[in-house]
Image: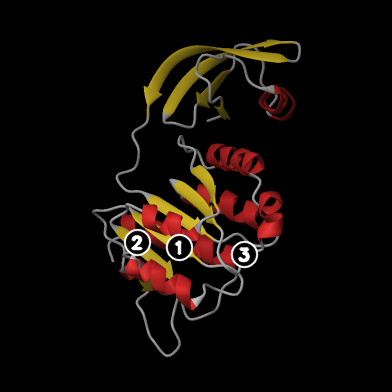
């Protein structure tokens, strides 16, 4: 399936980048069939009409793809390098995620936050990953600069914090997922959460979990955690 992204269902034309990809990379032409999603569950089967550099399409049929029966929401303190944040967004989108919330913590470098968390670019990366993995829902991506307000706002039934206290064994995240409820998993920054942040999260219903025996970089922990939560929902353990 050749899947393209057009968020505005009133428009029946591919944007410049999508047009170039369809004609120059995929070698598609007038009369060929493509599929278009709006990133909100709508899937359209369409027939192409290539006019010069412009690529239009006619909708043949439309289907609404239902959402998954569960939600995976990842909350992550961003790394200091934009490319690492972009990589984790790409991989988590491919695996399956409904929300990606970047959160500022005490150990987050606030001066560079708007550069390393470029929401416009991250949404483009997520859209590309959505198409590549043949999905029809674009994850919502946000930047939250108030840690306490974000923690207090979480309404998921299962709220997990990737944090292992010294000399304290905690269960792996895969063992703490409730298959009947949505899950949010909180991943800390380089330098980890402060004791005060951990205490605040615990006071607001979060539960500590492990991601395994080794210490992981933030971006690795985010992808591993996202995969583990998805696995807990989809595999009988």
Among numbered discs 1 and 3, the one appearing first in the sequence: 3
Q: Is residue 190 visible?
A: yes
| Disc 3 element | loop
- Can you identify the residue that label 2 sits on? 159
Q: Is residue 147 left or right of residue 19?
A: left
Q: Image quadrant for the C terminus?
A: bottom left
Q: How far apart in space, not on screen, are marks 2 and 1 (Cα)? A: 8 Å
Q: Residue at (31%, 65%) from the top-left corner?
A: 205
The residue located at (32%, 52%) in the rendering is: 155
> Picture quarter containing residue 191?
bottom right
- The colour scheme used here is secondary structure
Crowd tier of the residue under label 3, counting other residues whose Cα lies within 10 Å: few below 14, some 14–19, many 20 or above: many
| Vertical comparison of 47 with 135: above or below | above
Q: SS class of the residue under badge 1?
A: strand
Residue at 52% x, 16% y is 46
Q: Is residue 172 left or right of residue 135?
A: left
Mark sitting earlier along the chain (2/3): 3
The image quadrant that residue 178 belongs to is: bottom left
Figure check: 214 above or below 63? below
Residue 136, horizontal then vertical, whole percent: 46, 34
> Label 1 vs label 3: CA separation?
14 Å
Which one is nearer the viewer's eye here, 224 or 48? 224
Label 2, label 3: how far apart the Cα atoms are: 21 Å
> Residue at (49%, 27%) from the top-left corner?
38
Residue placed most toward the observer, 48 or 110: 110
Residue 55, given in percent of the width and then of the height, sits at: 66, 15
Q: Can you identify the residue that label 3 sits on? A: 108
Q: Position of residue 156 (x, y in %)?
A: 32, 53
Marks 2,1: beta carbons within 8 A: yes
């Amino acid at each position: 399936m050749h899947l393209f992204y057009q968020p505005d269902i009133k428009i029946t034309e591919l944007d410049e980048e999508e047009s170039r990809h369809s004609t120059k990379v995929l070698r598609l032409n007038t009369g060929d069939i493509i599929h278009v999603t709006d990133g909100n569950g709508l899937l359209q089967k369409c027939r192409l009409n290539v006019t010069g550099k412009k690529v239009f399409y006619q909708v043949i049929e439309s289907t609404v793809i239902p959402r998954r029966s569960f939600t995976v929401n990842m909350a992550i303190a961003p790394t200091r390098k934009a490319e690492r944040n972009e990589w984790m967004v790409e991989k988590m989108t491919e695996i399956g995620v409904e929300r990606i919330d970047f959160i500022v913590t005490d150990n987050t470098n606030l001066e560079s936050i708007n550069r390393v968390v470029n929401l416009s670019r991250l949404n483009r990366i997520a859209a590309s990953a959505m198409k590549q993995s043949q999905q029809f829902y674009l994850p919502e991506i946000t930047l939250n600069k108030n840690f306490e307000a974000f923690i207090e706002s979480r309404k998921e039934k299962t709220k997990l914090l990737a944090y292992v206290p010294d000399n304290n064994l905690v269960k792996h995240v895969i063992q703490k997922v409730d298959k009947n409820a949505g899950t949010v998993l909180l991943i800390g920054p380089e330098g980890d959460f402060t004791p005060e942040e951990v205490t605040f999260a615990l006071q607001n219903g979060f539960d500590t979990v492990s991601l395994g025996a080794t210490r992981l970089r933030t971006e690795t922990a985010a992808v591993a955690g996202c995969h583990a939560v998805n696995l807990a929902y989809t595999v009988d353990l």
